[in-house]
Image (tube, grey):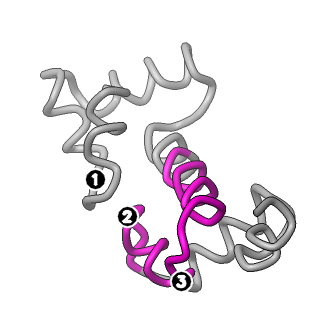
């Protein structure tokens, strides 16, 4: 399941997609993630995308909206909100500080 997320994070991924890859029910997938990773599959996906975005912010010159799109976020506002929640700063600030 994690490999599927890591390979496909740039595309839209649903809980159904993750469950389908391992032929399990959605509730089984949720239980496995909660038991082993202590988060939901979608939360894991969002955090993985944010980690990839943070790396792109410091290793490329792509603008924030391109990076958001390239890491699977369809909504730039949602991307910026979630980025700030996790990194305690906006993507542009992160780039300046870490780059």
Residue at 44% across, 38% down:
41
- The x and y percentages for residue 55 are 60, 53
Q: Name the element at disc 3.
A: loop
Residue at the limit of the structure toward the top, as seen here: 36
Give the magenta part as a residue range: 48-74
- The x and y percentages for residue 42 are 45, 47
Label of residue 72 in the image: 2
Relative height, residue 86 to residue 3 (above, below): below
Q: Quadrant of residue 70?
A: bottom left
Label of residue 13 in the image: 1
Decide which of tag 2 and tag 1 comes sooner along the chain: 1
- The x and y percentages for residue 81 are 68, 75
Let me know if residue 22 is in the magenta part.
Answer: no
Let me know if residue 49 is in the magenta part.
Answer: yes
Label 1 near label 2: C-beta < 8 Å?
Answer: yes
Decide which of tag 3 and tag 1 comes sooner along the chain: 1
Dividing the image into 4 quarters, which one contains the N terminus?
A: top left
Crowdedness near tag 1: few (<14), some (14–19) or many (≥20) residues, C-alpha within 10 Å: some
Q: CA distance from mark 2 to mark 1?
A: 9 Å
Q: Name the element at disc 1.
A: loop
- The x and y percentages for residue 67 are 48, 72
Relative height, residue 98 to residue 17 (above, below): below
Q: CA distance from mark 3 to mark 1?
A: 23 Å
In-front residue for pair 8/54: 54
Q: Name the element at disc 2.
A: loop
Crowdedness near tag 3: few (<14), some (14–19) or many (≥20) residues, C-alpha within 10 Å: few
Decide which of tag 3 and tag 2 comes sooner along the chain: 3
Q: Is residue 99 left or right of residue 78?
A: right
In-front residue for pair 95/9: 95
């Amino acid at each position: 399941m994690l490999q599927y997320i890591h390979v496909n994070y740039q595309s839209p991924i649903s809980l159904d997609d993750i469950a389908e890859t391992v032929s399990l029910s959605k509730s089984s997938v949720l239980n496995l993630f909660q038991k082993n990773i202590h988060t939901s599959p979608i939360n894991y996906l969002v955090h993985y995308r944010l980690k990839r975005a943070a790396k792109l912010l410091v290793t490329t010159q792509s603008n924030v909206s391109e990076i958001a799109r390239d890491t699977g976020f369809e909504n730039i506002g949602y991307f910026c909100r979630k980025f700030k929640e996790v990194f305690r700063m906006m993507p542009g600030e992160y780039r300046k500080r870490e780059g």
